Image (tube, helix red, strand yellow):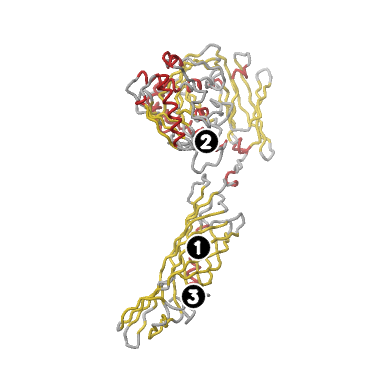
Amino acid sequence: MLPINKLTQRFTICSLMLFLGHMTIQAQTTQPTWWFGVSGAANFNFYDGTTQRLNNTLIAPTAFHDGFGIRPYGSFLIEYRPASALGVMLNVGYDGRGGKFDDVIAPCNCPATLETNTSYITVEPSLRLRVASSNFYLFAGPRVAFNLNKDFSYTQLRQPDTDSELSEMRKTVVSGQIGAGYDFDISSPNSRTKINLSPFVSFHPYFGQDARDIESWSITSVRTGIALKFGRGEKDAIADAPVAVPVTDVIFTVREPKEISLNHQISETLPLRNSVFFNPGSSEIPSRYVLLSADQAGNFKEEQLLNEQSANTNGRSARQLNVYHNILNILGDRMRANPTTSITLVGASAKGKKEGRAFAESIKEYMVTSFGIDGSRITTNGRTEPVIPSKQPDGTRELALLREEDRRVDIQSTSAELLMEVGGGMMKPIQINASQVDPLDSHVILNVKGAEKQLKSWSVALTDANGIVQNYGPFTKDQASIPGKTILNNSQEGTYQIAMNGETKDGLPVKKESSLHLISQKETIEKSFRYSILFDFNKSNTVASYEKFLTDVVSPLITSGSTVIIHGHTDVIGDVTYNTTLSQSRSEQTQNSIERVLSGSGVTNVKFETSGFGEDLDHAPFENNLPEERFYNRTVVIDIIPAI
């Protein structure tokens, strides 16, 4: 057996190793207050004292003194970790304290052995002290153990082996422990569900650990193991706080349009979302979807929807939503024209599969009744949530909007005449000829990199050659846009000096300067092309999944000297800054994909204008009131303007 002072040395070394570990690994987020989990460990049990009377019928001829054994330990645990360094822990579990005594020689000059299999149900409350605001912690507290097993095995060469139970075992043992551990955070920094993997070591001295009411057998244990802990917390306010950016990091740039056009003729390929959303409390198809009688359906043709006009300034037609709301009529027309095709309607409702199936049956009935589609070509299923749900398992924000999006029917088909694979199954897109008033490529884009983190607000003053000043602002985001025709007013051309004036969050002034030259092009420009790619809420489809679409469909339309305007958008769900970053990243990835294709095709002198507007309502393609509007706002829009 090792002396107690050597055990203490080993325990101290283990603690120092854990302490050094915390100096290099820092917690990324504030941990939850309450934690629950399990632990597993090995007890290194050291025996001391005297054991000779094993039970009322067996007394060993020679006393046993020292021994050693390794036995398992397992527990369920609860931890309370408030903001302060001091917390509490509670472990309840199985505690193995068995081992083997050192062999002795009986008077018959023959060896004798004794092995015990003692075990306990243990309750261990402890105080928990976090060291130096790190993940390293110390703990100490009592141990209350209730005897579970008292078996022993005794062998002696010249008598039969004996397997029995020790007598006079204490039913309850009260002792103590002291230990140390380290919490490694293995969960995602953005996840509210936190997971800690926590190695630990503890020392259980012999004080109070006399196992029996007779003799002097005592146990000293060193426990080493690992715990798996789960907690639920809020976002780390410190981690999410804006990092101060030096004033010199505020960069002001201006994107001036090549010319101000008042009108664009656009041939737009509009993706059709393959979902129909249902109102709460009803399995009827909502009235916002265009529903036709059998006579009306007989005269309906998809081509009737091709000439949708636009009169807004968002760069996206608000009336395009009317095309989507004809999704069932488009589907019926396509199935009628392609009699070998079939579909599966998958309805989803949090209230259960039955209501989800009822949604799907409503659509099937409409297709059969109005368009005369054979019911055997339509299969219906019900689910509690869609295959790709908007509501995520750890989501906590804007749940009402996400649940609204998951109350829907998804249209599935393997028929190319109905659906096409464009980063995920969706309805084969429809071609729209639109007239776009005040297109986005006619806007002056003002970029103030670092504004959201550094500035309270910023404004711009535009001074023309005659000294007339136009003021715009204040703005708070990194990007703002002004229609070029607003700046020119009735002029055909103009040169402007731009002064950006801002105020830092510390109250300091910031001033940057640039220049701008605008030319008005009165006539309509013919003809540009527009493509859109859509993203699910959980980001399961990325820009990479559109690689074939961008390579085979979009890039071949780009000729030398063209301008390609790429702008990304999101819905209003989630953090504003995160959404802006996400839309910018998707736009840049789209540009990179197109550039790779063009570099190998000999197309040159292509000008890219790439932006990420996030959930900015001034540039959002649609409103955010309906689930389908939010789905269509999760998009990257690509405008291809050929060289004049």
Q: Dot 2 corresponds to which residue?
A: 402
Between the C-alphas of marks 2 and 3, the distance is: 59 Å
**Marks 3 and 1, how far apart in space?**
19 Å
Looking at the image, is mark 2 or mark 3 earlier in the sequence? Answer: 3
Name the quadrant containing residue 327: top left
| Secondary structure under the numbered disc 1 in the rendered image | strand
Q: Residues within 10 Å of mark 2 (few under 14, many from 20)?
A: some
Q: Earlier in the sequence, mark 1 or mark 2?
A: 1
Between disc 2 and disc 3, the foreground one is 3
Question: Residue at horizontal 44%, vertical 74%?
Answer: 46
Q: Cβ–Cβ below 8 Å for labels 2 and 3?
A: no
On the image, the x and y values in percent for residue 238 come to 60, 47
Marking on residue 119 = none
Tell me the SS state at disc 3.
loop
Residue 57: percent from left, percent from top? 39, 82
Task: Out of 67 and 296, give the one closest to the viewer.
Answer: 296
- Residue at image point 55% right, 68% down: 142
Distance from Cα at disc 1 to Cα at disc 2: 40 Å
Q: Could you tell whether 361 is left or right of 503 in the image?
A: left
Q: Quadrant of the N terminus?
A: bottom left
Q: Which mark is residue 92?
A: 1
The amino acid on which the numbered mark 1 sits, given as a three-letter code, is Val
Q: Which residue is mark 3?
A: 170
Residue that extends furthest to the top in the rendered view of this protein:
523
Residue 316, visible in the rendered structure: yes
